[in-house]
Amino acid sequence: QQAKQREPSVRVREDWQVIDEIPFSALAKLNSPNVGEPEELSVWGSLEYYDKR
């Protein structure tokens, strides 16, 4: 199966300075054991079911 090419959600500009780079493999190893249960902060509207078939 071929990966779908997606457009970036943020356009990187030439004048931006690189502060840090994190290899994708390092993200897979992250562990956050002290993260609590999620909390709903607010509700803004609603979405209906969408069937893209």
Image: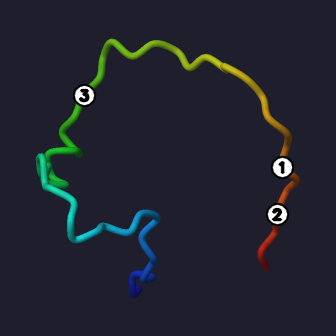
| Dot placed on the residue nearer the N-terminal end, 1 or 3 | 3
Question: 33 or 15: nearer the eye?
Answer: 15
**Where residue 47 is drawn, which disc sits there?**
1
Q: Position of residue 26 (x, y in %)?
A: 14, 45
- Residue 49 drawn above or below residue 53: above
Q: Amino acid at mark 3?
A: Asn
Placement of the C terminus among the 4 image quadrants: bottom right
- Name the image quarter holding residue 3: bottom left
Please report the residue visible at 78 percent of the width from the left and 29 percent of the height from the top. Answer: 43
Identify residue for label 2.
50
Q: CA distance from mark 1 to mark 2?
A: 9 Å
**Where residue 31 is drawn, which disc sits there?**
3
Q: Position of residue 9 (x, y in %)?
A: 46, 65
Please report the residue visible at 73 percent of the width from the left and 23 percent of the height from the top. Answer: 42
Q: Amino acid at mark 1?
A: Leu
Q: Is residue 44 left or right of residue 32?
A: right
- Name the image quarter holding residue 29: top left
**Where residue 2 is drawn, which disc sits there?**
none
